[in-house]
Each structure stands twice: as structure tokens, then as C-alpha cells.
């Protein structure tokens, strides 16, 4: 009797809508991980890229499209990297822990726009003419600063996954502290690339300095005492 029940259960067709438990749990973890704030950050980070694509498709990239793409991608990259740096200080000031989940996507999107910035310079502006590129780097110091920022951020982007976090252990944090050097260098690159008014990059540079100062242990303890005076 028991054998007949087992045979009947084996022969019973499975529902088309049934899914393995592992797939359901993976979907539940995905659904749980994506908060409205994270979705908004992804959408907002992609909007400048989609905007450039739309302007390119409508032949509306101004009279100097290469310069327009270069300046837009560079500016967006710096803004995203500054926002990445701001997550921890804002959490320290206001206790917004959900911001910690935004550091990786903001940093990766920042690197994405830096890559577009570099690709525009190498491919569209100089056509991969390496003698001209080397000559431009010798004449224009801001090019060297920009390439230096890109090289510093490259290992951060390559090791941004959880697998690399496990492999590198404590060294992972040491490597990712390179962003503290890369962002100021990117600001210097921006300032030197301008021929006249540098007030805007100076403003963002001062903001970066403030965000970096807030990471100093003494400043962090002082802010913690202000938030929790009884402790």
C-alpha cells in the first residue's frame, strides 16, 4: 500500500507555477534588499547617461559634442563620488544607517562615469593616438591628475564584490581607503582643466575636505558626544 502511494506521488505532475525553494528564497532576499531609497539612487545615477544618449540620438550635443560629453561625465562622476564619501558622515551626524547601503552603488556609478570620461578623452578626442596622448599629458598637467584618479579608483571597482571582501579580509578596507586620495585628486584635475573661474571646484573641494575631516577619530568622538551627551 505504501509503495503504491509513493509511486502515485512520483507520477503526479508538478504545477507549472511551482518553483524550487532556493529560487523563492533568492527572490525574497532580492526583494528585501532593494529599498525605495536604493532604487531611487540607481535611477538617479543612470539618468545622466540616458540623458546623454537621448541628446546624442537627437543630434543635440552642442556645437562641441566631445567637450560636452567630457565635461558632463566628469562632473557627474565627481558628484557621485562626493555623495559616496558623504554617506558615513551623514550616518554619523543623523543616524541614517540606510545610507551605508548606498556607498557601493554610488562609488561604482562614479567609476562608471569616470570610465566614460576617460574613454571619451582617449577614443573620441585623441582617437587612441598614443604619441598625441603622451604629448598632451606632458603639456597639460590636469590630464595626469585625471589619469591618476582613475588608476586609484580602478582596484576599488574591481574588488567591490563580497567575494573580494572575503578574500582580502582586513586589506579590503585598506585598499578602499584610496578613495580618500582619489577624490581630492579628481577635484584638482577639474580645477586645472578650467581656464578661468574655479570657484565651483573649490567649493566642492572644500566639501570633500570637510567630509574627510569628519572621519578623523577625534572628530567622530566629538560628534558622538554631541548626539549622545549623557554617554
Image (cartoon, rainbow, N blue to C red):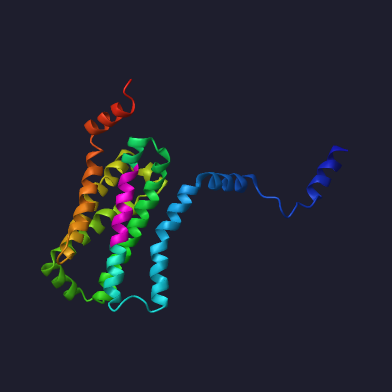
When asked about the image quadrant of residue 153, the answer is bottom left
- Residue 229 lies, with reference to residue 108, above or below; the image says above
Magenta stretch: give its range: 75-87
Foreground residue among 56 and 182: 56
Closest to the observer, 67 or 114? 67
Specify the farthest residue to the left: 139
Residue 90, x across and y down, in percent: 34, 40
Query: Is 185 colored magenta in this rendering?
Result: no
Q: In the image, is residue 142 above or below residue 22?
A: below
Quarter of the figure with residue 226: top left
Asked if one can make out residue 149 in the rendered structure from this viewpoint, the answer is yes
x 40%, y 51%: residue: 105
Q: Residue furthest right?
A: 1
Q: Is 224 rendered above or below residue 191?
A: above
Q: Position of residue 224 (x, y in %)?
A: 30, 29
Which quadrant does the C terminus fall into? top left
The majority secondary structure of the magenta stretch comes to: helix
Residue 213, above or below 142? above
The number of discs equals: 0
| Relative depth, front residue between 167 and 120 | 120
Residue that protrudes farthest toward the top in the picture: 230
Question: Is 181 on the left or on the right of 12, as rendered?
Answer: left
Decide if residue 128 is in sight here: no
Residue 76 shown in magenta = yes
Q: Position of residue 84 (x, y in %)?
A: 33, 48
How far across and how far down the image is residue 11, in percent? 81, 50
Instruction: Locate the N terminus and report the quarter of the image it occupies.
Output: top right
Amino acid at each position: 500500500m505504501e509503495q503504491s502511494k509513493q509511486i502515485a506521488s512520483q507520477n503526479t505532475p508538478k504545477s507549472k507555477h511551482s518553483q524550487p525553494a532556493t529560487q523563492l528564497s533568492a527572490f525574497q532576499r532580492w526583494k528585501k534588499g532593494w529599498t525605495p531609497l536604493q532604487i531611487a539612487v540607481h535611477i538617479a545615477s543612470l539618468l545622466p547617461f540616458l540623458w546623454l544618449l537621448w541628446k546624442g540620438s537627437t543630434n543635440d550635443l552642442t556645437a562641441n559634442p566631445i567637450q560636452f560629453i567630457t565635461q558632463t561625465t566628469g562632473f557627474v562622476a565627481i558628484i557621485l563620488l562626493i555623495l559616496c564619501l558623504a554617506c558615513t558622515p551623514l550616518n554619523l551626524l543623523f543616524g541614517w544607517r540606510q545610507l551605508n547601503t548606498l556607498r557601493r552603488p554610488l562609488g561604482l556609478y562614479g567609476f562608471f562615469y569616470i570610465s566614460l570620461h576617460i574613454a571619451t578623452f582617449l577614443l573620441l578626442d585623441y582617437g587612441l593616438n598614443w604619441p598625441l596622448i603622451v604629448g598632451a599629458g606632458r603639456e597639460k598637467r590636469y590630464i595626469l591628475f585625471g589619469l591618476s584618479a582613475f588608476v586609484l579608483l580602478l582596484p576599488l571597482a574591481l574588488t567591490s564584490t563580497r567575494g573580494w571582501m572575503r578574500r582580502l579580509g582586513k586589506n579590503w578596507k585598506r585598499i578602499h581607503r584610496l578613495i580618500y586620495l582619489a577624490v581630492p585628486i579628481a577635484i584638482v584635475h577639474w580645477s586645472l582643466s578650467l581656464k578661468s573661474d574655479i570657484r565651483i571646484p573649490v567649493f566642492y573641494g572644500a566639501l570633500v575636505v570637510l567630509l574627510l575631516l569628519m572621519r578623523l577619530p577625534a572628530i567622530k568622538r566629538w560628534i558622538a558626544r554631541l548626539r549622545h551627551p549623557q554617554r
